[in-house]
Amino acid sequence: MTDLEAALRTVVRGEVGFDVTSRALVTMDASNYRRVPLGVVAPHDAEDVAAVLEVCRDHMVPVVARGGGTSIAGQATGTGVVLDFTRHMNKVVSLDPETRTAVVQPGLVLDRLQDAAAPHGLLFGPDPSTHSRCTLGGMIGNNSCGAHSVAWGTTADSVRELDVISGRGERLRLGREWAGAPEGLRELVEGDLARLRTGFPELPRRISGYALDALLPERGADVARSFCGSEGTLGILTEAVVRLVEAPRARALAVLAYPDESAAAEAAAGLLPYGPLTVEGMAADLVPSPTALPAGGAWLFVETGGESEAEARARAEAIVRAADVVDALVVTDPAGQRALWRIREDASGTATRMPDGSEAWPGWEDCAVPPARLGAYLRDFRALLTAHGLRGTPYGHFGDGCIHVRIDFDLLTEAGVGRFRRFSEELAEVVVAHGGSLSGEHGDGQARAELLPKMYGEELVGLFERAKGVWDPDDLLNPGMLVRPAPLDSNLRFSVLPRKPVDVAFGYPADGGDFSAAVRRCVGVAKCRTTSATGSAVMCPSFRATGDEEHSTRGRARLLHEMLAGELVTDGWRSTEVRDALDLCLACKGCRSDCPVEVDMATYKAEFLHHHYEGRRRPAAHHSMGRLPEWLRLVARTRTASLVNALAGVRPLAWTAKRLGGIAPEREIPRLATQTFSRWWERRREGAAAAGGGLGRSGELVILWPDTFTEHLSPSVGQAAVRVLEAAGLRVALPPTVRMRTPSGDGGAGGGVAVAMDPVSLLRGRGRVCCGLTYVSTGQLDRARAVLRRTLDLMEPVLEGPAPVVVLEPSCAAALRSDLPELLHDDPRARRLADRVLTFAEALDRLAPDWTPPRLDRPVTGQTHCHQHAVLGDAADRRLRAAAGLSGELSGGCCGLAGNFGFEEGHFEVSVACAEEQLLPGVRTAREGAVVLADGFSCRTQLEQLAGVRGRHLAEVLADALEGGGDVVGEE
């Protein structure tokens, strides 16, 4: 233990972390920069903060305050001690509806303040797109703004008083009329009033530099306002009094379509006289699927408020009439508005990938110019991009003249970094020429502080340095930011990554086969750190269960980044730090869809486990559950399912089996089916043949995949699916079980493939198809490849014909669609099979569009399977449920069992916490007679073991209804 660490542990009540994991998690924010700190402290209160500052001052170690870590200019990273306020100092201390003020701590997430204010009809005006994870302390440090700044201004406009500890440990309460000003600040300002009155451009989004002009006497000498935007360089915030505003009773959102972004930018300023709440702009490049938007090449999102929905709509429609648009849409439904706003909010992540998949980065994320000059500025900006051979798609706060943009800088080579510098210097001059600010929201940090003399001149920047000296004479607080800054092209986070591709098992097709590029996808916007799942979202259930950064998608990506860098995490694939962080990853794949840049941590986890345990002893759970298909096939071949079930019912034997298998003792071992699905299928065919009839051969052929769970654990699902598919006029066959090198016939719907697959003799063959899911989830990728290649061999006759493959278990369908082609990227058959895969609902939707399912007219409850949400989509399921009269929405989130995860020893508590987030409360509060839908075996098992509720696959519900009986209601 170092002297610094020991001294901190002596005086701090909160956590002190000098271990590799604690440090690795905060080496980066959402910027291009990286710094390795000495340690991290999570202060318990202001006393802890003061104690940290004293110890660090004695040891001459810098201190950096950090909130949500979503800063885009590098100001939330540092080489000394990082203060993490999110763990303890994260509360609403008080809220006074009468005065419309709240007292908050710096680690409070903005959405939690909004939740507290909403019952009183109030809200905090500034609302960055990161509102679900950014903190009030970070917003004050950066003077954040958000979409509603045209109505409610910046964070500085909403601050009343601030409790701050200066670099020398002085406790200050900042306010107006010089309240709390450190000694010497007033003299500094009053000695240079003329410069302060003339040196700052007048525009709504001027964030750059220190706001010393707020200290002018005619502006109330507001020390609290002046402190906003100082990026933790002047003092450490411990508490804030903030102003709240009255929330509109109703809102409407007008989406105005324009031919291109320039036309949208030119129009934005003209809409301000109508008093909108927002005027946000974005172009088509940032919208993966613009079907929800009116036709156009760019859009303005203009929100209006009113006392009623009619009033809000009338204001929105007035703006539409006044705007010169090619198309428009007005939405008053709150759910519809949220869906549209998500398109805009995800742009900060979406923009990190160009349309061709190449990478783009921040650095010039939020320059601002007077709104009336935005169109002209964007034209000059585009010209400069072209001159440097760069690309980027602007979006953002057009009504305030502030744009965000990610640019495809090459930050990996010396030549690319040189171009990054030249472009930055020239763009700064363009911004200043338009009367703008280098930062319009996210602060200067390291990205722009070096260029502040271009905006303010050397003398005013010198005044900034003198002000820093008054507040923090020892340069203890966040050195290298704002004044005496580090060069904008130093400390780049990419410089430490390997230059040659790492040898990996998966193909990473979206990243050019480069695992480093896959890890670089995480830019740190931290959507995975949301503290509550909303709607259908899944990501990131483990973080919501523990609240620890290392259990977020971002945290795990940071550790993988440091593993590749090799400076902090030094043992590569053998790293215990990375292994432990990934241990609580449920592999739900929620990040694959919910992360704006589609980080796929489930795949990265499988990759890591593959290398980590290569040539080493694996955990028992990898053998007991990773090789589950093998054990279950052995039981089926020996006809010992009844014996296994009986033994599992003997507690001492079950306890021993779970202990040896690495299974959580709290779990019950699921009962095995005494008759497999394939055996049922065989007997059904034998019975039909004995009766002298067939099973019907007139419809289109579909291949029903006998996944491990359907085959051995839930054959009733497969049986139900057969009945429904046949009722819809489809002809069902199972995959071959022996390899047929030359299938007979033409391979069409009535030809040789059907003949090859239908005979009963094939069911007695040696091979079984398998998606490899359990091997992939436990990182046994060599075994997974072998299993999948055998599967492709067996499926060759199917692939030579047109028959689709229907997979009932969502996790298996997702494995075939995504893991198969990425793992066997060198085998063209893998893509052919992946493209054939249909879910149960998709099969009925595409192959039997005229079939009418039976009407149930029941409400539903349950949860969309996380893999279905992330990989497969549920649009067809929604249509099928609606056609069957099954009303209501399924919840998002993850059931928490997630295949082997919830069964593994040490995971039970997190598994239960995930289930208690949405699934179990939704089932408990469901309407009477609700059908409990759960297409995944894991989801059904979780419901049964934790709530005593029987969940059912949609196929089972429809099959029972077809037969005019059976219980379609979940049973307690």
Image (tube, rainbow, N blue to C red):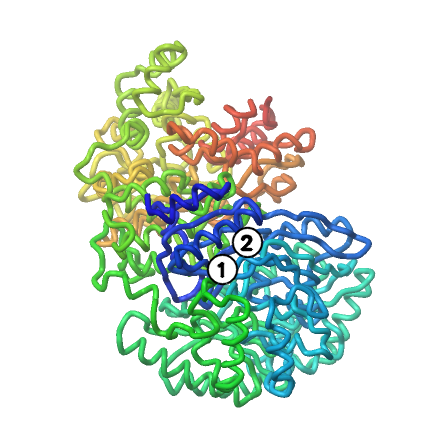
Task: Identify residue type, mark 2.
Answer: Arg
* Gap in angstroms between the C-alphas marked 2 and 1: 8 Å
**Residue found 46% across the figure and 61% down from its top:** 76
Please tell me in which quadrant of the rendered image residue 317 appears. bottom right
Q: Do the CB atoms of the residues marked 2 and 1 lie less than 8 Å apart?
A: yes
The C terminus, quarter of image: top right
The N terminus, quarter of image: top left
- Residue 879 visible (yes or no): no
Q: Label 2: which residue? A: 133
Q: Is residue 789 left or right of residue 205?
A: left
| Residue 823 percent across, percent down from the top left | 27, 49
Task: Pick whichever of labels 2 and 1 is earlier in the sequence.
Answer: 1
User: Front-most of 419 and 602?
Assistant: 419
Q: Is residue 571 left or right of residue 459?
A: left
**Residue found 38% across the figure and 59% down from its top:** 79
Residue 315 sits above or below residue 651 on the image:
below
Residue 251 sits above or below residue 483 on the image:
above
Which numbered tag is attached to residue 679? Answer: none
User: Front-most of 150 and 874?
Assistant: 150
User: Front-most of 546 and 618?
Assistant: 546
Question: What number of labels is visible?
Answer: 2
| Residue 267 percent across, percent down from the top left | 64, 82
| Crowding at mark 2 (Cα within 10 Å: few <14, some 14-19, many 20+) | many
| Residue 577 percent across, percent down from the top left | 32, 43
**Residue found 35% across the figure and 40% down from its top:** 580
Which numbered tag is attached to residue 70? Answer: 1
Task: Identify residue type, mark 1.
Answer: Thr
Label 2 secondary element = loop
